[in-house]
Image (tube, rainbow, N blue to C red):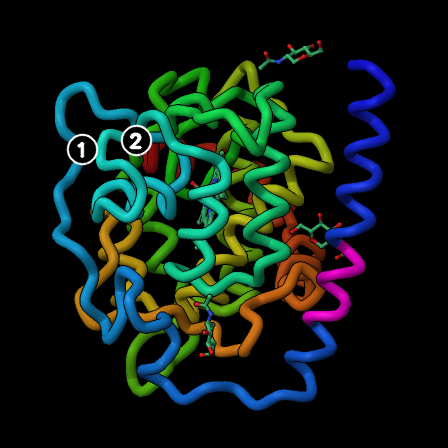
């Protein structure tokens, strides 16, 4: 990697964090919008109407990310999951899930850097995101590890059922996952994966990626089990669903960390050690 790339990255990351700080401040002083008015008019999902759901067909490209697969299944990005422009992804994840413009720029830039592609000019297929130990990592909540299941677009249903069964919270009488629940299931998945996958790896940065992904289920989905069942098992957005994020400028990176950091901090793999018997039963 040449020094222009390093300079470009440094420039990009300082800019994005300054901008994120500004948006976080604006979100703090402005009011949240009413429920039912989150997705802007003229965008897929406005008034809870998501475009037709069509699950993956032969030859389509899908990946380890349920959120991007769901967008392809609804045709919000190309249904084939191929030839996606990074810049389109940035625009579409924003109106679909209401993360801030900063987060929605940051992650696709990160992915383009990872794939040695040009963010502005290039396209990618969803499966390219599954580069092991790029963003994709072991001990995911919805997938077997790469060593056990090389096709990372495939969900592992028992993991998802286990995750949803961890919900201790309630929202209007509906079961709801909390930060604590997410820390517990993450600790369990890490212990299981370490005990069952001889190729297991998970460094600190990938623990944080894991917690970042997990935290989206608490923020964009409000932890609601009924919605998450559809989202995770079918990679579909329920009719009538809207993002639970109601900040006028979307969920900023700074604000998002207030979920990610406690979640990661509370994750205790050691609580599950020596539980190998139960682990085998799940896998
Ligand atoms: C454009 C940006 C995005 C990219 C490039 C991306 C990519 C990825 C990748 C590569 C993984 C696999 C990590 C693993 O091994 O577990 C992943 C997981 C995940 N992503 Fe995304 N993602 C993006 C945006 C989002 C958004 C906006 C959401 C939520 C609304 C989301 C939700 C998730 C969840 C819940 C997982 C965890 C699945 C698991 O643990 O099994 N992602 N993402
Ligand atoms: C995010 O949600 C806010 C509050 O509901 C809304 O005003 C805004 O238009 C949404 N932004 C996007 C890009 O969806
Ligand atoms: C990107 O480039 C770096 C440095 O040249 C190389 O180590 C890495 O394997 C490349 N990654 C991909 C996905 O091609
Ligand atoms: C917050 O989380 C992101 C990942 O979403 C990370 O890249 C960033 O450095 C974190 N820290 C701050 C202070 O925003």
Is 270 placed above or below 244 here?
above
Q: Main secondary structure of the magenta part?
A: helix
- Residue, x 73% and y 37% (percent of image)? 204
Q: Nearer the viewer, residue 15 or 174?
A: 15
Q: Quadrant of residue 64?
A: top left
Quadrant, the C terminus: top left
Could you say where residue 194 lies in the image, as x and y percent from the top left? Answer: 56, 28
Locate residue 168, reporting x and y percent: 42, 72
Was residue 200 drawn as part of the magenta stretch in this picture? no
Query: In the image, which residues are magenta?
Result: 17-23
Res. 168 in view: no
Check mark 2 vs ligand 1: CB closer than 8 Å? yes or no. Answer: no
Q: What kind of element bears circle 1? A: loop
Distance between mark 1 and mark 2 Cα atoms: 9 Å
Q: Quadrant of the image for the N terminus?
A: top right
What residue is disc 2 on? 81
Q: Position of residue 220 (x, y in %)?
A: 44, 64
N-terminal of the two: label 1 or label 2?
1
Q: Count numbered badges in the picture.
A: 2
Q: Nearer the viewer, residue 277 or 126?
A: 126
Note whether residue 243 is visible.
Answer: yes
The residue depicted at 35 percent of the width and 81 percent of the height is 37
Q: What residue sits 56% from the left and 65% below the top?
A: 180
């Amino acid at each position: 990697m040449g020094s222009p790339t390093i300079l470009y990255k440094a420039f990009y990351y300082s800019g994005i964090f300054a901008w994120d700080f500004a948006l976080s401040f604006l979100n703090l002083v402005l009011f949240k919008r009413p429920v039912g008015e989150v997705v802007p008019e003229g965008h897929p999902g406005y008034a809870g109407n998501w475009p037709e759901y069509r699950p993956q067909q032969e030859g389509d490209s899908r990946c380890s990310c349920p959120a991007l697969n769901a967008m392809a299944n609804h045709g919000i990005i190309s249904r084939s999951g191929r030839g996606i422009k990074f810049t389109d992804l940035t625009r579409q994840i924003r109106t679909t899930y209401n993360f801030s413009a900063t987060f929605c720029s940051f992650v696709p830039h990160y992915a383009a850097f990872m794939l040695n592609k040009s963010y502005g000019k290039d396209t990618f297929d969803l499966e390219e995101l599954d580069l092991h130990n790029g963003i994709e990592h072991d001990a995911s909540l919805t997938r077997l590890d790469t060593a056990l299941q090389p096709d990372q677009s495939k969900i592992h249903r028992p993991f998802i059922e286990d995750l949803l069964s961890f919900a201790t919270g309630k929202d209007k009488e509906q079961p709801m996952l909390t930060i604590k629940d997410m820390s517990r299931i993450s600790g369990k998945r890490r212990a299981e994966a370490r005990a069952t996958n001889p190729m297991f790896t998970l460094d600190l940065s990938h623990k944080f990626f894991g917690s970042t992904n997990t935290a989206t289920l608490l923020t964009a989905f409000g932890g609601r089990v009924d919605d998450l069942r559809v989202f995770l098992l079918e990679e579909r957005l329920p009719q009538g669903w809207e993002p639970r994020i109601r900040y006028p400028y979307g969920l900023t990176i700074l604000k998002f960390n207030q979920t990610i950091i406690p979640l990661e901090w509370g994750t205790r793999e050691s609580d599950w050690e020596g539980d190998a018997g139960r682990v085998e039963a799940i896998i």
